[in-house]
Image: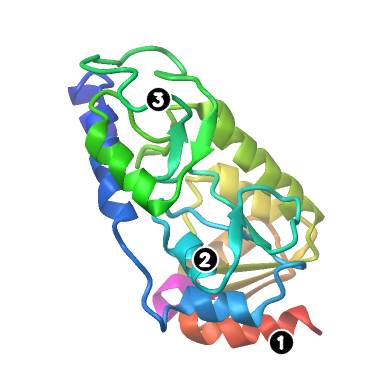
Amino acid sequence: MEAYYEYTNGSIMSFQRELAEYLASFRPTAKNVYITLLRELASQRVIYSSLNYDLLFELSAASIGLFTNYSSEYKRGGVRLLKFHGSSNFWPDLPTGMIRNVHISGSGRADIQAQIKPLNQIDTLNKCRLEDSIAPAIAMFAVGKTVKVSPDYVEHQYDLWKTQVIKSSKIFIVGVRVHEIDEHIWSLLGQVKGKITYFGFEGDKGEFEQWKENHKKKNAYFLKSDFENAVSLIRRMIHR
């Protein structure tokens, strides 16, 4: 992605928009593990976070009558989700087609800085298909995870996540590779006081143990498990 950014002189709106459309098109099945997760864990006590741009979590929540709140503040009937790398439905709050036939690149920190309005799946897909010059607020797949559309909003998501991680006594990680180059994640996790439980496959253990050693993180534990089996383990650990 970094090479593509340089090749296009920073013109990534079309790529990000097409990526968002592709990822937003997925829908959860009735047996989706997210649905099991949301049913098993009390939404009042848990704050979720995701590095994914798709809407599978949000759609799973909606299928069991929960709305998604992109905040650390609990609201009755909702589930809290922080997406600090952005999301395919994080669109600038601008009328569709307001910016058309415009080439935006090389604008410094942000190509567009506007308020973000999280959209549902249908509106997200419509935006992706109807807009020709802008894109949602999602990070680039490159070191640093730069966000060129409304970085203030995405950075606020990160600030909320950081605050909660520092405060949390129990942190559960599943479906994410230990990638220490992403210092904004793994350096912080190495410093927090809370107990960390990481669920992964045998091939993930080496990187996890190396990260643990690098940060002298004594209360970090590796459990060999896939996402589906991790759900029941997390439920038991939360209620200990």
Whether 203 is among the magenta residues is: yes
Q: Secondary structure at mark 3?
A: loop
Q: Earlier in the sequence, mark 2 or mark 3?
A: 2
Which residue, given by chain and number where applicable, does mark 1 sit on?
236
| Residue at image location 42% in from the left, 63% down from the top | 56
Amino acid under label 1?
A: Arg
What is the C-alpha distance between the residues marked 2 and 1?
25 Å
Residue 7 position (above or below residue 232): above
Mark-to-mark CA distance, 1 and 3: 46 Å
Magenta residues span 199-205
Q: Which residue is mark 2?
A: 62
Residue 164 located left or right of residue 158 = right
Q: Is residue 12 left or right of residue 50?
A: left
Asked if the magenta segment contains residue 74, the reply would be no
Helix, strand or loop at label 1? It is helix
Whole-percent x, y for residue 142 in the image: 36, 39
User: Which residue sits at x=50%, y=45%?
Assistant: 182
Please tell me how many numbered marks the rendered image carries. Answer: 3
Residue, disc 3: 95
Q: Amino acid at mark 3?
A: Pro
Occupied quadrant, residue 236:
bottom right
Is the C-beta separation of discs 2 and 1 under 8 Å?
Answer: no
The picture places residue 21, in percent across and down from the top left corner, at 27, 47
Q: Is residue 104 above or below residue 152?
A: above
